[in-house]
Image (cartoon, rainbow, N blue to C red):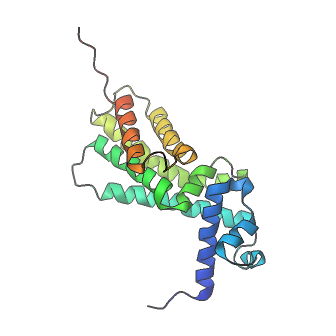
Amino acid sequence: MSRPSKSTLTRERILAAAAQVLSRKGYAGTRLSDVAEVADVQAPAIYYYWPSREELLEEVVTVGQQATLEHVVASLDALPPGTGAMDRIDCAIAAHLDVVLGRSDFSSAATRNAGQLPTDIRERQLVGQRAYADVWRRLVEEAVAAGELAGDVDVRAARMLVLGALNWAPEWWDPQRGSLEDVVAVAQHVVRSGLGPRFPILD
């Protein structure tokens, strides 16, 4: 198996640096000079690989979206056959937070900047966003069908609220003030408590 060329490795290093800077500084605050500094290249060298700043950052977001989708789907696929619907949602919550908070600058960048992207880029990202939303829609629908979520729950509202909360986590989470495991456990508890079947209170 041949080793990647120097050019390929440099491109990958620049892309990774862009993900790191975009995750930290946001779309408006990301400058090519910052990316070049992290990647240890001269800023003009970036144009050898991408015609514009926008195309570089769009690729970061595309890679990040795909990384999140693949990690969550792979985690669900690894569950034993017959895993309960609510346990599958717990798994998806853990996988999502794992990838956006601790595993991938690309996923974090894509999540944190979804609302900051220019209209044309945002529209091109809709396909990936819908594919990921479909994963969660099926999870919620399966839980309702299994009686593990409240039967009268608005499936779309539930999905949007859960994803909104998970996607907001990179904005406030500080690893110095709480572990990733604690955040996952709280998120799972909130979803189970908030969307689980509502039983009547007995006197």
> Residue at (39%, 34%) from the top-left corner?
190
Outermost right residue: 44
Q: Position of residue 103 (x, y in %)?
A: 46, 61
Q: Quadrant of the C terminus?
A: top left
Residue 116 rendering spot, x and y as whole percentages: 68, 49
Residue plotted at (44% across, 45% down): 178
**61 horizontally vs 82: left or right:** right
Q: Is residue 10 above or below residue 175?
A: below
In the displayed structure image, the side of residue 87 where residue 22 appears, left or right: right
Asked whether residue 127 is in view, the answer is: no
Picture quadrant of residue 198: top left
- Quadrant of the image occupied by residue 11: bottom right
Percent position of residue 95, x then y: 40, 53
Query: What residue is at 74 percent from the left and 54 percent from the top?
Result: 28
Depicted 75 relative to depicted 42: above or below: above
The answer to whether 163 appears left or right of 45 in the picture is left
In the image shown, does 152 or 28 lie closer to the viewer? Answer: 28
Q: Is residue 3 visible?
A: yes
Give the left or right position of residue 42, taking residue 128 as reference.
right
- Residue 2, image x and y in percent? 48, 91
Identify the image quadrant of residue 27. bottom right
Q: Quadrant of the N terminus?
A: bottom left
188, above or below 30, in the image: above
Total numbered labels placed on residues in the image: 0
Residue at image coords 27%, 32%:
147
